[in-house]
Amino acid sequence: MPTPIVYFDLETTGLPHGGHLPDIIQIGAVDSYNQQEYDEYLLPTIPISAGATRVNGLTTNKRRTRLFHHNQEIHADEMYTGLGKFLSWLRDMFDEPVLLVAHNAFNFDAKILLKNLEHYQIEDYDSVIWGFSDTLLASKDVYPQGSAKLEAIQERLGLPPTNPHDAFCDSHALRVMVRRMVNQNNLNYQQFIKSPSWCLPLSEMKRRYRIAEEVQEVPDYFTDIIHGLNSMRINSVY
């Protein structure tokens, strides 16, 4: 039986920088057949950056006990509860571990999701998540010329623009984009999504995440050297 595929997207408190990874404040997801969908907000434990607010319109009160979207209060779960609910939804909707698909998964969505799951001590996600597939890398392979941003690929495929920077809308837009890309290029859907060039099992993603943590502890004067070695390693893989 094919591995269940779920497209997902995150809105966060900001972008990763240095040793810091942001909190998740929205999770949007939809299954491959557009039959099951998920949309929930989370209350972060760290401030939402001004740049993130300009993009996604999300803010909190000073005590971070209430979440607002364009100044309208919306329901949001505490981090532990919200992350657990997402895993429960995946577990309840599918009979086996799922493949999570995101645009720029390896550098953003997958890394941040795993960091949040570990930081907030959410257990047993290994039995729920099979791995991750990165459609940004897939898009660059199919269309090596031009931008591989979601909006650019939508335009190339003749799809209407969607509401960007809303995790629920973006997860749906990604599903439609991949389906159209597969059909227009006569690709096998499962083989395309699970290509080893842009799809990795959870065990490999966790290994990469631990390496990133170890690099952060190295003295600053080694940072440039390590970044160069990591770039060489990544280029040899992709």
Image: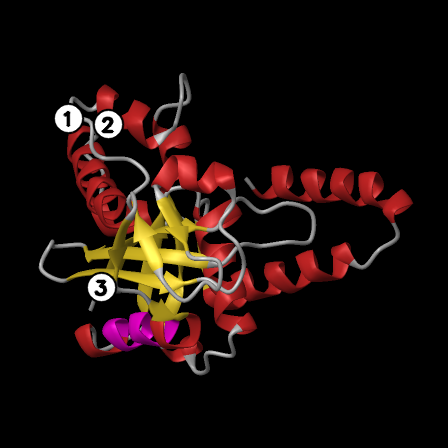
Q: Which residue is mark 1?
A: 160
Nearer the observer, 15 or 124: 15
Q: Is residue 2 above or below residue 149?
A: below
- Between circles 2 and 1, the one closer to the viewer is 1
**Residue on which the image places disc 3:** 2
Q: Nearer the viewer, residue 71 or 212?
A: 71
Q: Which residues are magenta?
A: 83-90
Image coords of residue 232 (percent x, y): 70, 38
Which amino acid type is shown beneath numbered disc 1? Answer: Pro
Q: SS at mark 3? A: loop
- Of tags 1 and 3, which is closer to the observer? 1
Tag 2 and tag 1, C-beta contact below 8 Å: yes
- Where residue 166 sits, quadrant-wise, is top left
Rendering quarter of residue 66: bottom left
**Kind of element beneath mark 1:** loop
Other residues around mark 2 within 10 Å, as few (<14) / some (14–19) / many (≥20): many
